[in-house]
């Protein structure tokens, strides 16, 4: 079982889009996949076709130890992967966990109880480096960092890399950077090309070969509660995420 945290404290860089579509693409390649939604916005849950108003429970209850992951997991029928959903309740977790024992290892312990039920567990992190994100980084084997190739992208990256170093030193010695994913890429944009080249210069093989293009189908699919693979399989976005899944399977 490989646990990958999809993280970037910068908002709107394509974390959730990557989590949902990578989950669907790995499932399409025959892998057993669990998506854990760690954002109170619950976008990964709705984007996977889960109705947030009819949950057996949510990841919030798992983090405060009142339910197990098995209790809350729902199978996303059409998309062929499992989801541990989230909703607004999770916004309170931060405050409630502050004085609790083992507050950083709650998610890790919950996932360990699943045994070998999945090939991949993908963690969709919120856009901050809060306690929930620290739980994700503590539970994960590796971090996938989606990013837009913009001027400030590299600056934000150093904060994240420092947080990863701290978690590695204190909570999770095996944590590594799985890869950096260029998202919403526009080939005609000169700045994007420059930042992309800098990224490869600096991080070398850690940058995925697969590039996710800007593609309107990727933005439309969530409003139908579908990964893009189900919404428009032939689209450039769907094909890019299938290719990313292949690249990740080969690396792991
Ligand atoms: P947050 O930090 O709020 O959790 P996020 O990093 O999870 O955001 P997404 O929600 O995946 O980012 O994407 C932000 C917006 O950009 C969404 O409206 C999404 O549909 C759109 N989007 C993501 N990737 C692409 C893409 N490759 N092409 C076009 N639109 C995209
Ligand atoms: Mg998100």
Image (tube, helix red, strand yellow):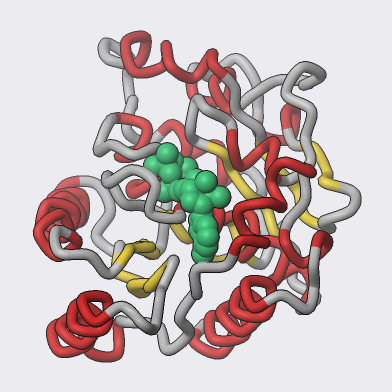
Q: Which residue shows up at 39% across the image and 72% down it?
A: 181
Q: Is residue 124 visible?
A: no
User: Please, is residue 24 above or below residue 126 in the view?
Assistant: below
The residue that appears at 42% across and 89% down in the rendered structure is 209
Q: Is residue 198 above or below residue 218?
A: below
Quarter of the image where the N terminus is located = bottom right
Q: Is residue 40 left or right of residue 204?
A: right
* Residue at left offset 68%, top offset 72%: 238
Residue 251 to residue 179: above or below: below
Q: Residue sitting at 75 percent across and 27 percent down?
A: 71
Image location (x, y in percent) of residue 97: 35, 16
Q: Nearer the viewer, residue 151 or 147?
A: 151
View extreme (right): residue: 77
In the image, is 237 to the left or to the right of 209? right
The residue lying toward the viewer, choosing from 25 and 240, is 240
101, 43: nearer the viewer? 43
Along the horizontal axis of the image, is 190 left or right of 145? Answer: left
- Residue toward you, 178 or 166: 178
The image shows residue 6, relative to residue 66, as above or below, that is below
In the image, residue 141 lies at what x, y percent? 40, 62
């Amino acid at each position: 079982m490989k646990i990958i945290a999809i993280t970037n404290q910068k908002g709107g860089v394509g974390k959730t889009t990557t989590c949902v579509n990578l989950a669907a693409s790995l499932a399409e390649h025959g892998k057993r996949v669990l998506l854990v939604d760690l954002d109170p916005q619950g976008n990964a849950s709705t984007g996977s076709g889960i109705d947030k108003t009819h949950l057996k429970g949510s990841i919030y209850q798992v983090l405060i130890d009142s339910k197990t992951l098995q209790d809350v997991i729902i199978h996303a029928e059409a998309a062929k992967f499992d989801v541990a959903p989230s909703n607004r309740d999770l916004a309170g977790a931060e405050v409630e966990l502050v004085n609790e024992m083992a507050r950083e290892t709650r998610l890790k312990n919950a996932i360990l109880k699943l045994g070998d039920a999945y090939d991949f567990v993908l963690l969709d992190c919120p856009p901050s480096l809060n306690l929930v994100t620290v739980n994700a980084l503590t539970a994960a084997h590796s971090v996938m960092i989606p990013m837009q190739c913009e001027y400030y992208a590299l600056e934000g990256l150093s904060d994240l890399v420092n947080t990863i170093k701290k978690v590695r030193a204190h909570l999770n010695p095996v944590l590594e950077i799985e890869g950096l994913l260029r998202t919403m890429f526009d080939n005609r944009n000169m700045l994007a090309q420059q930042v992309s080249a800098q990224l490869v210069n600096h991080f070398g093989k850690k940058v995925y070969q697969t590039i996710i293009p800007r593609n309107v189908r990727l933005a439309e699919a969530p409003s139908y509660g579908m990964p893009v693979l189900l919404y428009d399989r032939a689209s450039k976005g769907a094909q890019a995420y299938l290719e990313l899944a292949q690249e990740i399977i080969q690396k792991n």
